[in-house]
Image (cartoon, rainbow, N blue to C red):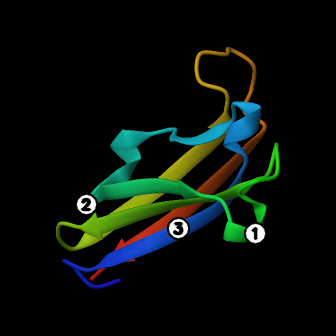
Amino acid sequence: MRAGSEFTLALKANHSTGYEWVLADSAALGRLRLVSKDYTIPRLDRDRDGAGGTERWVFRSDGPGNGVVALAYLRPGETTPPADSARFRVTVR
């Protein structure tokens, strides 16, 4: 990606289960900064109990370099291993 630009990661999630994506290693971000994070449920599913949705994470680069976005899908406060994880390597030019 180019320095100063933004990118979005979209991950399936279901907050009704208590699970959510969390940043697992903020030090690994390098030149990346979290701009925003939101969760949406598709309009057709909003009235369904237990419906899942999508978490969108928006990042911006401060300058050239490398970074890693490491996310864990877990219930905050629990000590069990995450139900899922995702890792994205990003090169900023």
User: How far apart, in angstroms, are the residues tagged by discs 1 and 3?
Assistant: 22 Å
Choose the circle earlier in sequence order: 1 or 3: 3
Residue 31 — which label? 2
Question: Label 1, on which residue?
Answer: 44
What's under tag 1, amino acid-wise? Leu
Label 2 secondary element:
loop
**Residue drawn where x is 66% and y is 59% of the image:** 41
Q: Are marks 2 and 3 in contact (CB under 8 Å)?
A: no
Q: Position of residue 37 (x, y in %)?
A: 42, 54
User: How far apart, in angstroms, are the residues tagged by discs 2 and 3?
Assistant: 16 Å
Label 1 secondary element:
helix
Q: Is 22 located above or below residue 33 in the figure? A: above
- The residue mark sitting in front, 1 or 2, is 1
Question: Label 3, on which residue?
Answer: 9
Residue 81 — which label? none
**Residue drawn where x is 46% and y is 72% of the image:** 8
**Residue drawn where x is 39% and y is 65% of the image:** 58
* Left or right: where 28 falls relative to 2: right
Q: Is 64 located above or below residue 55 in the figure? A: below
Question: Looking at the rendering, which quadrant does residue 45 occupy?
Answer: bottom right
Choose the circle earlier in sequence order: 2 or 3: 3
Q: Is 19 located above or below residue 34 in the figure? A: above
Q: Position of residue 28 (x, y in %)?
A: 39, 47
Question: Which one is in front, 85 or 38?
Answer: 38
* Left or right: where 33 falls relative to 13: left
